[in-house]
Image: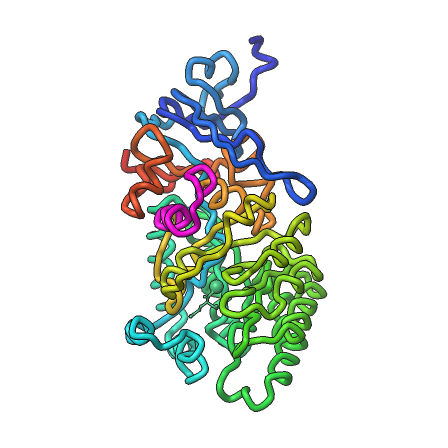
Amino acid sequence: MPAAEKVKADFIIHNLASAVVFPEPYRGKGTIPGWRTEELKNASIAARDGVIVWVGPSASLSDEVQIAATARFFNGCGLTAVPGFVDSHTHLVYAGDRSDEFEMRVQGRPYLDILAAGGGILRTTEAIRNMPEELIFVETLERVEQIMQTGVTTVEIKTGYGLDLESELKMLRVIDRLREESMIRIVPTFMGAHAIPADRRSDPDAFVDEICNVWIPEVARQELAIFNDVFTESKAFSVEQSRRILKAGIENGLRAKIHADEVNVLGGVDLAVEIGAVSADHLLMTCAEGIAKLKDSGVIPTVLPGTSTYLMESHHAPARKMIDAGLPLAIASDHNPGSCQFLGATIIQSLAMLQLRLSASEALIAGTLHAAHALSLGDKIGAIEPGRRMDLALFAGDSFRQIGYQAGSSRVEALVAGGVVAIDRV
Ligand code: NIG
Ligand code: FE
């Protein structure tokens, strides 16, 4: 091919055993998700300025790519490259320990009962309020480094353990500093409406008013969040309260997310569709009616198999029915100190297969491309495709099917975030 027609590259990963591509990627509302993966054998991937420009057989590299004299090379050493995982739902900033509640739950005490009795989210709130910001940062950075080992290159992190303006801003500042100092992409979500603190229980509507009229405008003014999330659940926020909170967010430029149908079906899915939420998450109890409403809505249904497992539910989100209905299902970890201590992407890949009955291809697409859509980044990250950021996880072996199979024990051999090698044990 003449040089003029070649794509220019400044970073090349060569000598991969395989690179996994998605031949029919979901491209947003109005399009149908494809669930096929293709393993390109003996592959190379080329990037320019951190963006993928070419992927193909190593044998065609020099014919099709114009390699800059100063280009960097990375030997893929017979590894498999998948898109970096996108963990689109986490509560990664927290403090303290709730292992006693874990044992109480194992012995039969319901999660929402513990919350109603002042434990659960409210206990972590106390711990967050008391812990110095610097220490919260250090502990959370360690978790970010752990999830990078599992192949995560983008992580959404929610607030919601501050529950007063000052402490919510403290959490947001920690997330902002992580965004500056870690090598992967961090997406901040404000979740002031995570629980109602004990001293606000006598007038929950006044608490909601304050979130809408004071907290959300201040968070938006300081440009510390992209999304606004709410826990729509009995013993948390009603649909009417959630509507006010999410609308206030939208009016202030924060896109909506919702914790819906986790324990009870209150109408969170209807609300998500009504206000055009980016994603509706949990959906454990969602039935055929909810699935029909989500169809063609553009709302990304995000299910969290780690949580239903950790809460010892006998029932899991109806992921298979969602796929069969043509929904662009996403999966995420929901890592948090109470309802899910599973950390990182690889164990969630396994749980998606074991509990939700997804195929390895479905789990991979749900945890990368569709999770990217759940963060409004569906055209920028989440797949090995020219035009997308070069975010890659390199695993041992010649097939990505090892990832779910190994039940969380596999660790990346290398991690590339925006064309920069963030982990290298090759
Ligand atoms: O997504 N459901 C609400 N929030 C979290 C749990 C937070 C906690 O228990 O600390 C969740 O499951
Ligand atoms: Fe959550």
Q: Position of residue 160 (x, y in %)?
A: 50, 71
**Residue placed farthest to the bottom in the image?**
202
Instruction: State left or right for residue 355 relative to residue 97.
Output: right
Q: Residue at x 48, y 19 (%)?
A: 67
Of the pair 113 and 43, the residue shown nearer to us: 113
Q: Position of residue 37 (x, y in %)?
A: 48, 31
Give the quadrant of the N terminus: top right
Residue in the picture at 66% in, 64% down:
271
In the rendered image, the quadrant that contains the C terminus is: top left
- The foreground one among 353 and 154 is 353
User: Magenta segment, principal secondary structure?
Assistant: helix
Report the number of discs: 0
When the figure is inspected, residue 304 is found, relative to residue 404, above or below; the finding is below
**Percent coordinates x, y for residue 367 in the rendering:** 47, 46
Q: Is residue 50 visible?
A: no
The residue that appears at 47% across and 68% down in the rendered structure is 171
Q: Give the left or right position of residue 182, taking residue 4 as reference.
A: left
* Up/down of 422 relative to 263, above or below: above
Asked if 198 appears above or below 264 in the picture, the reply is: below
State whether residue 298 appears in this view: yes
Q: How is the image coloured?
A: rainbow
Q: Nearer the viewer, residue 202 or 11?
A: 202
Q: Residue 23 occupies which quadrant of the picture?
A: top right
Span colored in magenta: 346-363
Left or right: residue 370 compared with residue 87? right
| Residue 116 belongs to the span the image colors magenta | no
Q: Is residue 355 part of the magenta span, yes or no?
A: yes
The location of residue 401, given as percent across then percent down, is: 36, 35
Residue 289 sits in quarter: bottom right
